Structures are given as structure tokens and as C-alpha cells.
């Protein structure tokens, strides 16, 4: 089969489109003919050589996958050859105390497709049976690949960790990102007042269409100052952020007393400074988030099927042009998801 691989860590030039062996499925696995695979910043970090993800080289990236069932293992039941499916990106053991309690993203062996195991930048992928879910009838393959990772992440941040309530005000950093575009929609569905940020004026109407009540261009305005104006000096109840050092102080200073900051990423670096006096005197909560549970993914898939959520896709590329897709993602000149198609 054809796949995009990298044989050593480094820049986008390491991505090579070439022939690799077809996956061989085990008795409890499913072989999927990939039709679409969405890009995530995780793909870039792993390609660059993040110490958090020790991969065997050569490696195939890609966590968000949709396609058609090509073959099933002998122990597989409930999944049919020819079925349109999408893949839950997180792989859990389903035996430990966390998995049995429905907190599978806390599993001791938790990993992601495309991280410590081969991903979807390929014509075929094998996945565990439990990771295969039917595509809602109204979704294309591209849409089905664009929502899983970002929707389960946004849902877990907003509700499981932040406990967002109807009528609260939330600041969502980066409406043009995958997580941001989903978080804006989910927060609005929950009855929150949604403030969000973008980096260019042409992204403002796109954020409004998704449900944002106010949009701040961070390239032109100081976000924390504008937030204070919009909230009459109070600040927001919740901040959802995935950017890191570049916005860290802004996020903290945008919170109301007793506010909650939930972070799930570090696209601008790993280290931040923190004045503990500011945190305890204002009684702030800071929580880290990583992915979400399978139950949360099933719920967001239902919302997609009901057309209450939409997958925002900026552009698609042929699989062979994965390097161009990653370069566009790094440029930040996109709104929503970038998707590879086979």
C-alpha cells in the first residue's frame, strides 16, 4: 500500500510518500481502507521528535481516520465488511480500573493511533474492534475524519473538567483551530455566552457563524482588556486554551474570581511562568486535559448526526501531499481542520 512515512525526526521534508507493507490484522482487529485522515498538531510534534512519544521508525502519523471496513478478525462481531466507519483515536486496555470506571482516557496504557502505533496517513490501517464506530449517515468521509479528536477533547474540557453551566461566560482561545471551532459550538449548545479569539479579521465572521457572541482579533487587541470590557470588569468563568506560553498570562488575567482554566496543548512551547499569589488570592482552578472518553466521543457523534455540530474543514489534500498539509497547519492560515483524502 501507499503511505506517508518519516524515517528520521525533523522538518516536513522528512515526510515521504512510498510503498509499505499492508497491515496484518489480529483476531480482534479490523482492517480499514482509509478514505480520509485529518491532521493534528500531534502529527507535527511526533515528526519533530517529541520525547513524550517514543515511536519506532519509520513511522506513519495520523490519529483521525474514516473509511470502509476491508476485513475483520475471527473474533470480531458487530462490524461488517463494507461498512462506513470512523475511528476513536484513543486506544485503551479496557481492563484497568480507569477503563472499567468509564475513564478510559486515564488508562495506564492509553495511547493514540498515529502516536506509538501506525496511523492513518496510509491507504489501510488496522485498529482494535472497540475503536471502530459507524459514521452518521449524513456525514462524508472527510467530515467523519475531521471531528473525533477535537470534539472529544473540547467536550471533555468544557463539561467533565470545567463543569460549564448554562449562562456562564467562556473564553475559547483560537476559534480557527480544530479544538477551538468545536468548543465554540459545544459551549453555545450548552447555553453559555461565548467569547473567542482569532488572528485575522477574515476569521471573525466564521467564528460568529459557529456561535460566538464576541470575537477578538488578538493581533489587534489585548485580549484580557477586551474581555474585561465585554464582562464589565468581571472576567470569564472558564477559559479553554491549547496554545501555551504565548497566551498563558492573557488566559489567567481574563478569568473572574473563582474562574477555571483548562489547558490541553502547548503549540507555542512547554514552559510558562505562574505567580501562585495570583492563583490562590483569586481562587482560580487550573486543570490539564488529555483527550476524552469513548462515551464523550459517542455523544459528540450523535450531535454530528443530528446536525447540531458541524465539522469545519478548511481544505483537503491528496494523501501524497501530506507535507503541504502540515506546512499549511504550521502557517496558521486556516480555519477548522485540514484533511488528507485517499
Image: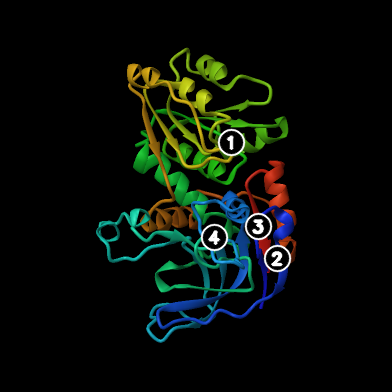
Along the polypeptide, which appears first: circle 3 or circle 4? 4
Q: Earlier in the sequence, mark 4 or mark 2?
A: 4
How many residues crowd mark 3 within 10 Å: few (<14), some (14–19), many (20+)? Answer: many
- Locate residue 254, reporting x and y percent: 48, 22
| Disc 1 target residue | 174
Report, in whole angstroms, how far the alpha carbon at label 1 lies from the one at label 4.
21 Å
Relative image position of residue 342 (x, y in whole percent): 68, 69
Q: Which residue is mark 2?
A: 319
Q: Position of residue 48 (x, y in %)?
A: 62, 52
Left or right: residue 1 compared with residue 237 = right
Residue 17 shown left or right of residue 70 in the figure: right
Residue 189 in the image: state x and y as whole percent. Answer: 45, 40
Sequence-earlier tag: 1 or 3: 1
The residue drawn where x is 27% and y is 62% is: 96
Q: Which residue is mark 4?
A: 63
Residue sitting at the far bottom: 74
Which dot marks residue 65?
A: none
Gap in angstroms between the C-alphas marked 3 and 2? 9 Å
Q: Quadrant of the N terminus?
A: bottom right
Query: With respect to residue 8, does 277 lie above or below?
Result: above
Amino acid at each position: 500500500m501507499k503511505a506517508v512515512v518519516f524515517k528520521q525526526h525533523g522538518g516536513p521534508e522528512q515526510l515521504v510518500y512510498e510503498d509499505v507493507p499492508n497491515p496484518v490484522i489480529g483476531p480482534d482487529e479490523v482492517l480499514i481502507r482509509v478514505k480520509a485522515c485529518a491532521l493534528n498538531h500531534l502529527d507535527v510534534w511526533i515528526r519533530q521528535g517529541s520525547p513524550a512519544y517514543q515511536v519506532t521508525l519509520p513511522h506513519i502519523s495520523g490519529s483521525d481516520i474514516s473509511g470502509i471496513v476491508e476485513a475483520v478478525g475471527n473474533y470480531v462481531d458487530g462490524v461488517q465488511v463494507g461498512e462506513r466507519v470512523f475511528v476513536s483515536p484513543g486506544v485503551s486496555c479496557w481492563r484497568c480500573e480507569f477503563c472499567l470506571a468509564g475513564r478510559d482516557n486515564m488508562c495506564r496504557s492509553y495511547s493514540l493511533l498515529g502516536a506509538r502505533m501506525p496511523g492513518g496517513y496510509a491507504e489501510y490501517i488496522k485498529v482494535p474492534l472497540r475503536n471502530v464506530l459507524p459514521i452518521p449517515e449524513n456525514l462524508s468521509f472527510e467530515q467523519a475524519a475531521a471531528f473525533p479528536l477535537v470534539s472529544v477533547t473540547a467536550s471533555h474540557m468544557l463539561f467533565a473538567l470545567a463543569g460549564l453551566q448554562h449562562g456562564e461566560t467562556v473564553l475559547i482561545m483560537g476559534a480557527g483551530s480544530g479544538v477551538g471551532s468545536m468548543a465554540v459550538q459545544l459551549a453555545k449548545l450548552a447555553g453559555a455566552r461565548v467569547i473567542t479569539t482569532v488572528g485575522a479579521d477574515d476569521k471573525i465572521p466564521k467564528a460568529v457563524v459557529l456561535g460566538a457572541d464576541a470575537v477578538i482579533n488578538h493581533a489587534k487587541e489585548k485580549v484580557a482588556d477586551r474581555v474585561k470590557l465585554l464582562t464589565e470588569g468581571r472576567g470569564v468563568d472558564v477559559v479553554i486554551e491549547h496554545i501555551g506560553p504565548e497566551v498563558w498570562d492573557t488566559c489567567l488575567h481574563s478569568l473572574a474570581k473563582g474562574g477555571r482554566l483548562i489547558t490541553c496543548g502547548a503549540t507555542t512551547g512547554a514552559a510558562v511562568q505562574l505567580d501562585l499569589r495570583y492563583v490562590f488570592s483569586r481562587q482560580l482552578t487550573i486543570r490539564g486535559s488529555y483527550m476524552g472518553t469513548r462515551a464523550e466521543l459517542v455523544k459528540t457523534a450523535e450531535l454530528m448526526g443530528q446536525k447540531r455540530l458541524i465539522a469545519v474543514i478548511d481544505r483537503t489534500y491528496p494523501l501524497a501531499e501530506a507535507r503541504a498539509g502540515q506546512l499549511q497547519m504550521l502557517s496558521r492560515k486556516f480555519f477548522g481542520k485540514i484533511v488528507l483524502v485517499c
